[in-house]
Amino acid sequence: MLVNKRISALLICLAFCVSLCACGRSDDINNTQTTEQTTQLYQESTTEETKPSETTEKPAETTTKATVKNETTKAVVLTTKANAITKVEEIPKTTVTYKYGTKITTIENSSSYDYSTFNVTTQQIKPEAVSVCSKRTNEMNAVLANTNSYRAEVGAQPLSLDDDLCVAATIRAIEMAWSNVFSHTRPDGRECFSIFEDMNISYSAVGENIAKGYFTADSVSEGWKGSSGHYKNMINTKFNKLGVGCYELSGNYYWVQLFKD
């Protein structure tokens, strides 16, 4: 009986030792590397990882610390011989892009703009302007109809919508939006009518109306009619062709009318 008790105690002791050894095998940490990408005209990748900290003097209290950082997630993993603790801290993703030289910084779903770097030519904007014109035909025709209605009230002949003028007007709307320069002076310092030269459009008499913040063709037409200088352009009998531009950026609408003989 005494022998059996000693054998049982020895087996329990061995089982306890095996259990401790099994728990001790969780020391290894698989560190995964992540990359941080920032889009800027080009892509740049960086990876940062700290080396595991040195072990303490007591093997039983061995602690390993690994830190992996990128722009979206920072994970801190603490592992001891007996347990593992993981803490994850979320960091908002940030991307940087450029359009027409303007810097766009996006954090999650919110974007901010640095217009100081705006730098673009008429020909570089033209492809987008042509595309926008094809999608804004309803707005263009509505502004044309309203303008001709005002002209009819004073006995002036109706204007016809001109495709080249519409592209030129849309270029003006786009450059105002992306430069944040709402003016008859263009972002490069030239007067607004230089767009005719850039587009090789000849003229004897020209005019320009601009507006910002109106959401519909009817509201912007009424706004122009209520302003004496803009209204004079709309009913000027020297003009017989009209170009209309409408461009939206971050909820802001930019409108342009270009008139010519």
Image (cartoon, rainbow, N blue to C red):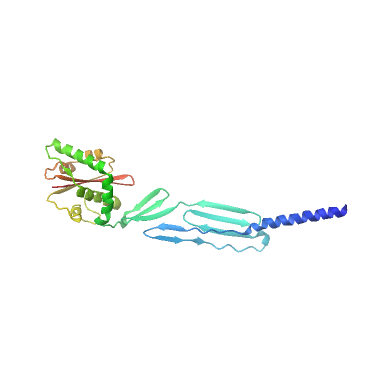
Task: Give percent across and percent down for residue 118.
Answer: 30, 56
Which quadrant of the structure image shows residue 37? bottom left
Q: What is the quadrant of residue 95 in the picture? A: bottom left
- Picture residue at 55% right of the left edge, 55% below the top: 76
Q: Position of residue 188 (x, y in %)?
A: 24, 57
In this picture, residue 47 sits left or right of residue 28: left
Residue at image point 53% right, 55% down: 75
Where residue 113 sits in the image (x, y, percent)?
35, 52
In depth, the one of 236 and 170 nearer the eye is 170
Name, please, the residue furthest toward the right: 1
Going 78% across and 53% down the picture, which residue do you hit? 12
Across and down, in percent, residue 235 comes to: 14, 41
Residue situated in front as seen by the camera: 92 or 130: 130
**Is residue 65 visible to us here?**
yes
Residue at the far top in the pictured view: 153
Q: Is residue 218 left or right of residue 233?
A: right
Q: How many marks?
A: 0
